[in-house]
């Protein structure tokens, strides 16, 4: 595995079979590593990740916002841990299907501790 990416404990302890898993399968992470937000989880073992980026406009000397939606393979070792709105770390691989060419490597939970506070507490 790459530096800084650890194998999740569920990949070691559970007994699932997934050839496209980056930890227990035949897939190697060979390209870029990027971070995005989970938009959809409607398909089995596939999630849609939104990647936000800034594009510099030379004429107006300002940055414009752009985004890309990617289909990403999510291994069963992350099942039940990743939800819509969470931030995931993904890595590029070989082509896995018609639309998927990257896998989930790690996730960061969406913080909800400071989102909803009562007016009395403020």
Image (cartoon, helix red, strand yellow):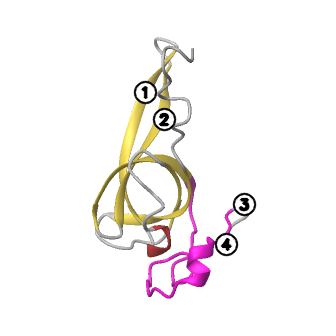
Task: Look at 41% across and 54% down and name the residue there.
Answer: 83
Position of residue 81 measured from the top left corner of the image (x, y, whole percent): 48, 61
Q: Which mark is residue 1?
A: 4
Most common secondary structure along the magenta stretch = loop
Q: Residues within 10 Å of mark 3 (few under 14, many from 20)?
A: few
- Of badges 1 and 3, the one in the foreground is 3
Q: Which residue is mark 2?
A: 53
Point out the image quarter for the C terminus: top right
Q: Are marks 3 and 4 in contact (CB under 8 Å)?
A: no
N-terminal of the two: label 2 or label 4?
Answer: 4
Point out the image quarter for the N terminus: bottom right
Q: Quadrant of residue 65?
A: top left
N-terminal of the two: label 2 or label 3?
Answer: 3
Q: Are marks 1 and 3 in contact (CB under 8 Å)?
A: no
SS type, badge 3: loop
SS type, badge 4: loop
SS type, badge 2: strand
Position of residue 58 measured from the top left corner of the image (x, y, whole percent): 50, 18
Task: Look at 36% across and 59% down and name the residue there.
Answer: 47
Task: Look at 30% across and 63% down and name the residue there.
Answer: 99
Q: Which residue is mark 1?
A: 65
- Of badges 4 and 1, the one in the foreground is 4
Q: Quadrant of residue 100?
A: bottom left
Which residues are the magenta region? Answer: 5-33
Q: Residues within 10 Å of mark 1 (few under 14, many from 20)?
A: few
Cα distance, mark 1 to mark 3?
28 Å
């Amino acid at each position: 595995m790459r530096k800084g990416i650890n194998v999740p404990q569920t990949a070691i302890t559970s007994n699932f079979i997934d050839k496209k898993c980056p930890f227990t399968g035949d897939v190697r992470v060979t390209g870029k590593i990027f971070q995005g937000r989970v938009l959809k989880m409607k398909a089995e073992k596939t999630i849609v990740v939104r990647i936000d980026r800034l594009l510099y406009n030379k004429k107006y000397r300002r940055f414009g916002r752009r985004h890309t939606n990617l289909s990403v393979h999510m291994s069963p070792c992350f099942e039940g841990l990743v939800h819509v709105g969470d931030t995931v770390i993904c890595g590029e691989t070989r082509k896995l299907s018609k639309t998927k060419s990257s896998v989930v490597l790690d996730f960061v939970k969406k913080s909800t501790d400071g989102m909803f506070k009562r007016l009395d507490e403020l």
